[in-house]
């Protein structure tokens, strides 16, 4: 097994560049931190290398490099990382498909989006479509927030207007979320739907909202101005499940 102890090693410096989005996109691979995410990446056949501090953590089928704690800290995103870093390939380039789809319109908070990805896996969503200005799919905070759901979910990034056009051509109803929409409890369960979720601060773009077939709202007590987008998404997905 190859050993690298210095965090100033040329190869480690090269891996550290994967913290940068442009470099990730060029290399089409990204870093993973922690045992659980590494395990999920391996199960998805996307893991290609691990850096470990102890030989007991050896993983079959991929390249293993024995490193120091200093190297792990150089590559990690958290302050107190687990002693394992994975290098994984990008997700496959999927085509827009499915009967239950989430469309994310300029969502910026990686924690919110990661929670949405986890919930979508639990409620039978076939695909997540990130708008062009939504959070980076390979943002570390998003990846960690998904708790591995990233590797069990079809995710693409594309212009939402084009996505909506393709979805409508399949006869799937486009559902928007709006403050003055139809109360969710009055909306019948749908087998097929595409749900649009809007930006945390301003909601769905007016131009996108005009393309919906139906807008819904979750009625809450007047003391609360609005729900967190991830919570709202989960409630709506549960309603339609």
Image (cartoon, helix red, strand yellow):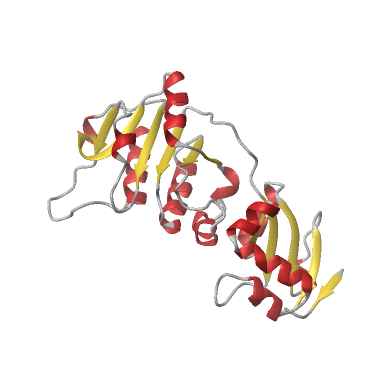
Tell me which residue sits at (13%, 55%) in the image: 223
Q: Residue at x 51, y 28 (%)?
A: 98
In this picture, residue 129 sits left or right of residue 49? left
Measured as percent of width and height from the top left, residue 160 is found at 43, 36
> On the picture, is 86 further left or further right than 143?
right
* Residue 10, horizontal then vertical, whole percent: 78, 73
Image quarter of the N terminus: bottom right
Query: Eyeballing the image, is 159 above or below 87?
Result: above
- How far across and down, in percent of the image, does residue 84 sit? 68, 68
Residue 149 visible at all: yes
Image location of residue 138, percent across then percent down:
57, 54
Quadrant in which residue 164 is drawn: top left
Comparing 27 with 184, the one in front is 27
Spot the residue most to the right.
Answer: 1
Tell me which corner region of the image, top left, top right, bottom left or bottom right, holds residue 186. Answer: top left
**Residue 241 visible, this angle:** no
Residue pictured at 70% horizontal, 54% vertical: 27
Vertical arrangement, residue 6 with respect to residue 11, above or below: below
């Amino acid at each position: 097994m190859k050993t690298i102890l210095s965090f100033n090693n040329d190869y480690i410096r090269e891996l550290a560049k994967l913290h940068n989005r442009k470099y990730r996109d060029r290399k089409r691979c990204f870093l993973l931190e922690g045992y659980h995410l590494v395990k999920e990446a391996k199960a998805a056949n996307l893991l290609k290398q691990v850096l470990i501090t102890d030989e007991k953590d050896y993983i079959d089928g991929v390249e293993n490099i024995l490193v120091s704690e200093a190297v792990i800290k150089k590559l990690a995103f958290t302050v107190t990382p687990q002693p394992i870093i994975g290098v994984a390939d990008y997700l496959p380039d999927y085509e827009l498909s499915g009967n239950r789809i989430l469309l994310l319109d300029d969502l910026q908070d990686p924690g919110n989006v990661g929670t949405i990805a986890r919930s979508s896996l639990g409620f039978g969503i076939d695909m997540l479509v990130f708008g062009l200005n939504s959070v980076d799919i390979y943002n570390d905070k998003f990846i960690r927030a998904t708790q591995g759901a990233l590797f069990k979910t079809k995710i693409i990034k594309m212009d939402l207007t084009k996505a909506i056009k393709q979805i409508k051509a399949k006869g799937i109803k486009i559902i928007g979320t709006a403050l003055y929409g139809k109360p969710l409890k009055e909306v019948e369960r749908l087998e097929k739907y595409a749900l649009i979720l809007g930006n945390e601060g301003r909601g769905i773009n007016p131009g996108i909202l005009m393309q919906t077939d139906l807008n819904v709202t979750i009625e809450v007590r007047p003391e609360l101005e609005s729900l967190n987008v991830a919570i709202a998404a989960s409630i709506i997905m549960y309603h339609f499940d």
